[in-house]
Amino acid sequence: MEIEADRGLVVEEVTSDWCGEIVAVERDLGTVTLEDRRGRRRTFPLGPGFLLEGAPVVLAPPARGGPAPKTRTASGSVAVPGTTARVARASRIFVEGRHDAELVEKVWGDDLRVEGVVVEYLEGVDDLPEHLRDFRPGPERRVGVLVDHLVPGSKESRIASSVARSPVGRHVLVVGHPFIDIWQAVKPGRLRLEAWPTVPRGTDWKRGVCQSLGWPHREQADIARAWRHILGGVRSYADLEPALLGRVEELIDFVTGPDVA
């Protein structure tokens, strides 16, 4: 029998004999956390392998509630019902990767559609100069670029300096945040973490984070599920670190100025 894994339900996991109350369900990760009577917690995959009052059950994630009408966008702007998207501007915002683009879309997407700004991802900042040569920035064709780990002495800072000195530098604004990866721009408290884990040098950062947190991490699909879980915890700008918020707003202002097409 399939049942929803509602908080407060007491079940037993059959392979470990762990019995406890459901205290958390992570839909994107496909996990359920049980707390026993001593306050200890363990996390298990959702699905079969549980007993409820001695009877086998399959735990499914609880049904989602319907969305409430929006009065503000996720970025904090006043929502204007019925507003249509503006025809895309010539100017663009580039971000490093798919996760960066998805986070920007989730928080600033409504604003960007009203402004007619398209966000594209580069799959890494190394090829930025080549992308700019293809795009050909100009006075009415500006490019704003958001990069990870823009700190003194980093590869990213060297690339940003090179772009600024180039012939198109005055039409391109490269800004960044200090985080190793865009995941860190999400406040850890939003995911019930005290802090993001420290990952040893030489270890893939995303996989190291997942391993430290006890999340599945061996396959790329595991990393994708982890990101969906993280992104699912973001409701608005309040869930992001200020070091990212200011930079994205700066880029939007740069590509939507009154003198830009």
Image: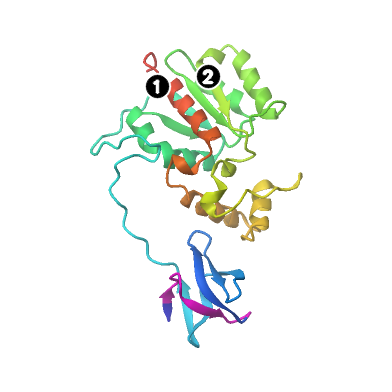
Q: Residues within 10 Å of mark 1 (few under 14, many from 20)?
A: some
- Residue at figure coordinates x 49%, y 17% from the top left: 137
Q: What kind of element bears circle 2?
A: strand
| Residue 50 position in % (x across, y down) | 53, 79
Instruction: Describe residue 87's horizontal placement relative to residue 31 as left or right.
Output: left
Query: Quadrant of the rendered structure where residue 109 is?
Result: top left
Find out whether the residues at labels 1 and 2 contact each other: C-beta distance under 8 Å: no
| Residue 51 position in % (x across, y down) | 51, 83
| Residue 114 position in % (x across, y down) | 32, 31
- Mark 1 — residue? 256
Residue 11 inside the magenta-drawn segment: yes
Residue type pointed to by label 2:
Val
Please tell me whether residue 113 is drawn above or below residue 226 in the rendered image: above
Q: What number of labels is visible?
A: 2
- Residue at figure coordinates x 62%, y 71% from the top left: 40
Query: Quadrant of the rendered structure where residue 76 is?
Result: top left
- Mark 2 — residue? 172
- Residue at figure coordinates x 49%, y 65% from the top left: 25
- Residue at figure coordinates x 60%, y 69% from the top left: 41
Residue 102 in sight here: no
The residue sitting at the left extreme is 82
Residue type pointed to by label 1:
Thr
Q: Earlier in the sequence, mark 1 or mark 2?
A: 2
Q: Which residues are magenta?
A: 3-16
Question: Of residues 104 and 159, which is closer to you in this image?
Answer: 104
| Residue 80 position in % (x across, y down) | 26, 36
Residue 125 in sight here: yes
Residue 117 inside the magenta-drawn segment: no
Q: Residues within 10 Å of mark 2 (few under 14, many from 20)?
A: many
Instruction: Give the CA separation, mark 1 to mark 2.
Output: 13 Å
